[in-house]
Image (spheres, rainbow, N blue to C red):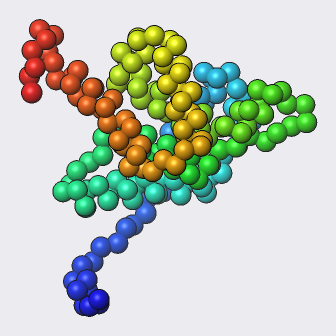
Amino acid sequence: MNDTRWQNIEFGYKEPPQEFINKELEKYDEIVTQFCEISKFDKNRVEINIQTLKDLIVRVDMRKLYFQVYHSNMKANEYKVIIGLECFWILKLRPFWVKILPNDSTETMHMATWINEKIALHMTCSLLKEYNPEFFERGRDICELYCKELEYSFRYRDLSKESMFLMFDPFYFTYLCNSSISEENLNII
């Protein structure tokens, strides 16, 4: 290959400023706090590898830039960012863990084993509750079955960022469709 072909292109990724990293770290701390409150799990038991979480933040930021550069300035929607990027990297890098103590219950040991999947599932469900509340109105048994299947998939299936994008695109387009309809049920797109 001709090495001179790319000499005219100056493009390099610069890591975000520390202020941005700190805001993102605070966001993840809040996510863990919410998760622990909902699951009634002691937040003090959840450990965070800060360096891994910073790596996750940078990787998500890099991919957002990728969208803009390689997809005609397209910005990733929240589904792609939260589920396809943030959750993907949580599952891949596993920044959260729970230290097992000698007298821990079976439930605590289960939480320790599945903490990253459970946090990713919490993030996914939080997004769906915000943008697709009707999903949770269709029956508790269906929602629980879906969430169990999703948690299992997060743990045992080979999921790429792109497959996670596609898995949740129907929810995104449902949101767009619902938000494009006026109160008079007229499509205003």
Is residue 26 at all visible to an observer of this figure? no
Q: Say which residue appears at 40% left-offset and 26% top-offset.
A: 128
The image quadrant where one finds the N terminus is bottom left
Front residue of this view, candidates 56 and 17: 56
Relative to residue 132, is residue 112 drawn left or right? right
Q: Residue 4 location in percent, x, y?
A: 25, 90
Q: Say which residue appears at 32% left-offset and 36% top-offset.
A: 169
Rendering quarter of residue 51: bottom right
Count of numbered tags:
0
Q: Residue 167 location in percent, x, y?
A: 39, 38
Judged from this view, the residue extending furthest toward the right is 102
Rendering quarter of residue 62: bottom left
Q: Residue 63 location in percent, x, y?
A: 37, 56
Q: Say which residue appears at 90% left-offset and 31% top-offset.
A: 103
Front residue of this view, candidates 136 and 57: 136
Q: Residue 95 location in percent, x, y?
A: 62, 49
Front residue of this view, candidates 20 and 110: 110
Is residue 187 at all visible to an observer of this figure? yes
Q: Is residue 56 above or below residue 15?
A: above
The image quadrant where one finds the C terminus is top left
Front residue of this view, candidates 151 and 19: 151
Q: Is residue 79 above or below residue 187?
A: below
Q: Say which residue appears at 58% left-offset and 53% top-offset.
A: 93
